[in-house]
Amino acid sequence: MKRITPHREYLAAEIESPAGAEVLLARKIVLATGMEGAGRWYTPPLLHELPKPYWAHASEGIDFAALRGKHVAVLGAAATAMDNAAAALEHGASVVDQYCRRPRVQSIQPYRWAAFAGFMRHIGEMDDLWRWRFLTYFLELREPFTKDAWSRVSRFPNYHMLTGRPWQRLGVADGRVAIDTPQGRAFADFLIAGTGIEVDHRLRPELAHFADDIATWNDCFKPPPGEENTRLGLYPYLSPSFAFVERVPGAAPALTNIHCFNFAATLSFGPSGAAIRPMKYLVPRLVRALTRDLFRADIAAHWKSFQDFRGYDFDGFPEMLGVEE
């Protein structure tokens, strides 16, 4: 999908299909666009200062076979970064150094606590303060790597997990990448950034028309002192039906028909459109919201249809009652 714009009582979705460019009209649009649909894959700015042949983001199609015999440095210590480190080792990298900016690797698995029905089903129904507290804590924990992923890398003697080593500067020296950290300088032949998602609806081309109209948590909620989080405050503040909310009431009424069911919904509803476990709770809620909105919008037509209804259980019944067709 390239762009969504209002079109009279509809939404116009510009899409690119095998047949070419098309414009589809819809009353409702659900953005079930996973992780990347929340914004974009995040790449630290210092990586963009390097020539592209020296690095890749974990979201790209990396030619791991080309890393055989190479010294690889991976930035990040969550699940995606670990999977990429393992893939590099399994394809014959000579050394893989994995850099974690935190002094300790995050090992708490938030889903293990959050998997019960009370949280998954109802956290999105709580007031703003409790949603903010639970879900900013949940999101800041990040998703750790799994035990299986650790088993994949730890069997290699040429693998190293380096904690407390944020990358401060990068440069190219004698055909290799120089990595400066608080512990000094190290070198690698190739870098992989497993650095997650940047959530910001303004980065999404399909929402460009509404970029200034969509309300965020920063717009709608003021956390108590000490609980502020400007980065997570960029998540959209969603209505109970997963729809975007207008930043200025009345400025963009079409937003009530664009429903966000991707990773960006996490701060409003908890794990939702980009996680498997909560689907059984939140997909029915989304469907009920869609059908309710459509029924409400058509209520006058349904009333007329009901009054005009002339359906009978069997053909003889109307004549028995003297009902005229």
Image: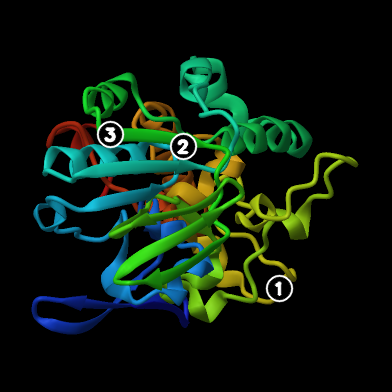
Q: Amino acid at mark 2?
A: Leu
Number of marks drawn: 3
Q: Which mark is residue 250?
A: 1
Q: Is residue 282 visible?
A: yes
Q: Is residue 303 visible?
A: no
Secondary structure of the residue carrying tag 1 is loop
Residue under label 3: 321
> At 60% from the left edge and 43% from the top edge, which residue is drawn?
267
Residue 265: x, y in percent? 52, 47
Q: Amino acid at mark 3?
A: Leu
Q: Residues within 10 Å of mark 1 (few under 14, many from 20)?
A: few
Residue 16: x, y in percent? 21, 78
Secondary structure of the residue carrying tag 3 is helix
> Which is more foreground, mark 1 or mark 2?
2
**CA separation in Å, label 1 and label 2:** 51 Å
- Observer-nearest of 97 and 293: 97
Residue under label 2: 162
Q: Amino acid at mark 1?
A: Gly
> Which is more foreground, mark 3 or mark 2?
2
> At 26% from the left edge and 29% from the top edge, which residue is drawn?
153
Q: Earlier in the sequence, mark 3 or mark 1?
A: 1
